[in-house]
Structures are given as structure tokens and as C-alpha cells.
Amino acid sequence: MIAILKRGTTPEQTEHLIQWLKHMDLDVHVSEGKEFTILGLVGDTTRVDMELLNSLEIVENVRRVSEPFKQANRKFHPNDSVISCANVKIGGGNFAMIAGPCSVESEKQIVDVATSVKAYGADILRGGAFKPRTSPYAFQGLKDAGIQMLLKAKEATGLPIITEIMNVRSLDLFEDVDIIQVGARNMQNFDLLQELGKTKKPILLKRGLANTLQELLMSAEYIMSEGNENIILCERGIRTYENYTRNTLDLSAIPVLHELTHLPVVVDPSHATGRASLVPSMAVAAAAAGADGIMVEVHNNPSCALCDGAQSLTPDQFKTLNQQVQKVREVLR
């Protein structure tokens, strides 16, 4: 349920109404828009007398929200959310380029890649320390040592870092990580999502391999329900019957999500296509569709990469891709 307050409502009147609603054991989320203030009510709203609430002098309108996701809903929060990470902003017209290797392999490798991608326009450094792999015999990442190497790269370049968490037990290791990534396989790991909701760190939440957009938003809702509203959604391709590409990139997800939610949306064309030759065109298409950021895999020697070399760009290819993406964004502006 949402209550839209009339223009001219004073802060004192708003606070009085909020306290009244909280006495009904409801959580109240305040969204200050350009035209109106919106109170989002979460909980057992059957206790609320809609006619009484609508009759109050300061209330313009009361509406029920039929969608199961509440806090992630644009009806609760009409303006775009802007997620801040160090000196980088994502959403609300702010765009971020996220680049780096699939896996951290050594300190020299990650520092070299970080230095290159920063020079070519990256805003955030990505790199996998914990690697969820289909095969138990594949490279699983350097784990906590990998995070330490990422922090060395951050120190050397100043780039904020993003890396994937696998389970709640590792959360303490992510204290100095700027953005925690939840991978596609963990999108519905609800225990993990709830624990991440108790942090204040930005969370990049990837869509599952076969999940609907509503399911993605409900996973975001798990995080938000624990108090963390710093969420970035990520479209990374879904599994279809097509096997020429690694996954099928759902570009329609970008405008649909922008209609449904205030949360920013970034796109990962590397995991979506699985082929480096396809990454630039899909990145440009994602920018044209209104994405708030692009996340690509970049390796200084893809043919020797320990993980996903086939979908990794070289630093020079990333430079060209970034130039193309920025041209598209300039046209859209």
C-alpha cells in the first residue's frame, strides 16, 4: 500500500502520520519526489482503514500495490535510485563501466589488468576470488588470497572493486570490498540474501539462469527487507534452447525493469554470450536500451586465462568497446 501526501504537507504532519502507521506494526518507507511525498507501507496492511487514511487532510490518494515486491517497486519510489560506491554513482543518469578478469590469478595479473582498464575508462574493477564452477575439478579461485590481491589492485589504481560471494561464512572477508556480487546461481540463496541485507554495502544481484524478472525483484526484496536498499540489478543472460551462445541476453529486461523498479540495471554481455567477438555489439545494444552500466571481462592474455578466456576482451578491445558505448550514450543524451 502507498499513501501519496498532498503538496504543502509539513514535516511535522508527515512524521505524525508515520508514527500513527507504525503503531499498526507497519514499516513505513518515505520517498521524497519532485511533486509528492510517498509513504510506502510494508506489512499486514489489512489493518489499515483505506477510507479513513484517504480522508485525512494531508493525504492525496491511497493505493494498494498488487505486485509482491514492495520496496523494490517504482510505485513506492518513483525516482531512480542512485547507488554510490566510493566516487562512482550508478543509476539516475549515472553510468558505470565495470571491467576486469573473470578470475584473479596473481597479484601482477590483477594489478596489470586494473591499470589498463582504468587507463581505458573503467570506473570499477571486477575480479573473481571465489569461483562457482559447474565442474568440481575446475579452477575454484584463490578465495581470501584473491581478495587481498584485489585490494592491492585497488590500492595501486584507486578503482573500487567488486567480487562475488559464495556463502554467508565468507562475509567477514568482504569487509573492504566495495560492491558484493551475488552470482546467478545464488540469486535465490535466501539465507545469504538476508545476511547481505543486514550490511550497508552495495549489492550487485545477478539474474538467475532461468529466473523471471519478478523472481529477480523478489530476491532484491529479500535484501531490502533487512534494511539494505543499495542494490544494483544485473541482466547476464538466461538459458534458452539456443546453444550457439553461452546464454541468451534478454535486452528487453532493461526497459521492463526500469518500468517496474527504481533500482539501477547493469548488463553483463560476457557471460551472456560467452564469446569475446559478440561482447562489443551486445554492450552497445545494452547501452542503447538504457542500461545504467556495463560489466565485461578483460584479461591481459585471454588464451592463457584460468577461467572464461573465450569471453574475455583484451585491454585494447575494452578501450574500443568503451569508446563505442560512450558514443551511443552521447547520442541518447
Image: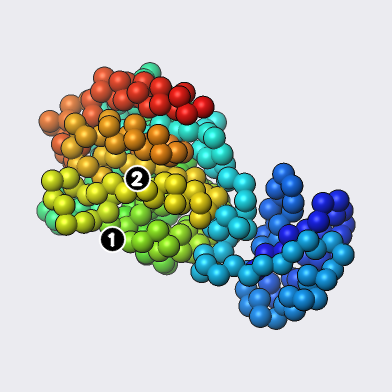
User: At label 2, which amino acid type do we have?
Assistant: Leu
Question: How far separated are the C-alphas under marks 1 and 2?
Answer: 15 Å
Residue 176's place in the image compared with 281, above or below, is below
Quickly name the residue at label 2. 251
Taking the spot 25% from the left edge, 34% from the top edge, the residue there is 279
Task: Establish if 48 lies above or below 73.
Answer: below
Earlier along the polypeptide chain: callout 1 or callout 2?
1
Q: Position of residue 137 (x, y in %)?
A: 12, 53
Query: Would residue 87 be seen by someone viewing this image from the given angle?
Result: yes
| Residue 262 horizontal/vertical position (percent) | 55, 50
* 130 sits to left or right of 308: right
- Pointers 1 and 2 in contact (CB under 8 A)? no
Give the secondary structure at mark 2. loop
Place of residue 184 in the rendered image (x, y in percent of width and height, measured from the top left): 32, 55
Q: Is residue 170 left or right of residue 247?
A: right
On the image, numbered disc 1 is attached to which residue?
210
Side of 221 relative to 167 (left or right):
right
Which residue is at 74% across, 51% downward? Answer: 36
Amino acid at the residue labelled 1: Ala
